[in-house]
Image (cartoon, grey):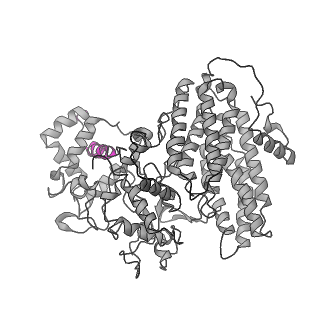
Amino acid sequence: MMCINLYHLKRGICSRFLFLVLTTLSVVSCKKENNTEAPLVSNSQNNSEFTEDLRSYYLQNLDSLETYLKLLDPSKSVSENKRIFKEVRKWYKYAEPFMIAFDNNNYLTINGPNLLIVHAEDYTEIKKIKPKSLQVVEELLYNEEGLNKEELELQLIFLRSRVPFMAHNHIIYKQKNKHYFKMIRDEIVTVATKGITGFDSPMQLNSTQESAHVYQSLWNILKIMEPAFGNTEIYHKILEEFKASKKLLFGSNFEDFDRYAFIKNHTNKQLQLLAEAFKVWKIDMAENAALNPYAENLFQKDFFNLNHFAPQGTPPISSERIALGKQLFNDKSLSGRGDMSCATCHVKEKAFTDGHKLGMGKNGIQLQRNTPTLSYAAYQRTFFYDGRGDGLEGQIVGVTNNENEFHIDLETLEEKVKNTPKYKIQFDSVYESKINSRNIRHAIATYIRSLSPFDSKFDQNMMGEENSLTTQEIKGFNLFMGKAACATCHFPPVFNGTVPPKFTESEFENLGITKTANFTHPILDDDPGLFYPYEVEERRGFFKTSTIRNVELTAPYMHNGAYNTLTDVLNFYNLGGGAGMGLEVPYQTLPSDELQLNTNDIEAIIAFMKTLTDAEY
């Protein structure tokens, strides 16, 4: 155990000074006799013997965070406040692993973006919450129009009260070693998917330096646990990896940082080492979360626990259910008129889109929006561009009942399947003779869930199975993850809007989409999007962030099919969306500043995006 129990020290200047010394010395541990016994294997069954020391470490980080928050002062110069704010962010990053793992609601609050939060349960239960977070403070300090001192003071009052409140979270008392290792693993994923992108440092772009602080904190955490695990070779390999990552990040420049090399050579190596360590140390990691704890690569097919993205109680995926679902997906006889199948609008060769500006319904009727891809749709939390579908099975109900699409009720659909001999035989085998609308929808949804092979050229290179990416393609990925800020909404590895590391929420954005790709004389699209059904003005024009995997095949783009080429799309973003082009978009979430990407940059980003085309295409 640690020589000094930090929690029992008096909180104040002395304790903070001691903590700074301990951090500088990389958390000095008690000397102990070298032994060759196996690590403690009971840790996965009992509460961790390190909880008190880890809790003390977390509380000291919160204490330092609180101290620097108190030093921020609207009466000081902006330059002085910026200097102090970097210290605030540093200590926040030291505490971040614990917040994400054990206090996620407070993490989402104090690190949230400067965007109005709208909770709408029904017409009478609509809450609009103005954000109070470190990101808001950052935008106030870096506002070119000058500092709003009154608003800064309001933000600081909230944060100064919130941080001490977080110190009383008792969840951390009850954790097992496996939970702390999951915490470490989730933070590694957080750095790779959000931390190095500018996601939570949008103005000062200090993300790589802040990620270095995270790796120092992970090193400290693992050192605290050294008595149980430090006598193994793999323990020292993980420590060395954390040290190497910190060094690489700390000396880097945001725009020039090679994110491709970092993820391939460091993130993936750390995931591999942790997966190996869990087996060596006999730590039984829970496999019911969004991520597969034994996955060794961010881009391997089973990095996710696919069943976690299906409704609770859903039957497991099997090859037989996939095959049955594929038949149902392609069967036109199941529609009301017998002339339309799922495949009519979701064409495999077009990555399950249809190539039209707007979807085409029965009798050539034009639908409201563009047909989205079904590839990687399994890794979304909501469906349809306006989020009205809760899951794949629910989305199928929407299509079935739509009078311009299948136009058939579920009871009639069920009867059609029951009266088809080949389906009766298959359902007898796969669903224990139960032909009902639930199992029909589940079979189709299971097929759609299988459309996520993670076998593109980019995946193969990240997995180390190929070394075929060009310099331009790698540059494009680094721009996508850095200067162009694409990855602050399209998170790897799926490159959609489902937010890591919990992957429990899919984001919606207001980009100020125009009706056409005429950016010289732009006209704002009038589709209300998320405005309905509760008619919340602050949600007008919001749409779900879709995946860019297979984007080479899914033109035209955006919910309204307004942009025919990827160049159109990149030019739109480069101009700062609708607001950047001078349109009135009061709730646009896309920054309106120009990205200042040149032609070579845009071509590189497009080259990268084309590497995300699945091998079968």
> Could you tell whether 10 is left or right of 591 in the image?
right
Observer able to see residue 132: yes
* Residue at the limit of the structure toward the front, as seen here: 471
Secondary structure mostly taken by the magenta-highlighted segment of the chain: helix
Which residue is painted at 26% across and 56% down in the image?
350
Q: Quadrant of the N terminus?
A: top right
Quadrant of the image occupied by residue 524: bottom left
Counting from the top left corner in percent of width and height, residue 420 is at 13, 43
Magenta stretch holds residue 470: no
Counting from the top left corner in percent of width and height, residue 256 is at 56, 57
Observer able to see residue 435: no
Region rendered in magenta: 432-451
> Could you tell whether 109 is left or right of 612 in the image?
right
Quadrant of the image occupied by residue 353: bottom left
Q: Nearer the viewer, residue 17 or 604?
A: 604
Q: Nearer the viewer, residue 36 or 541?
A: 36
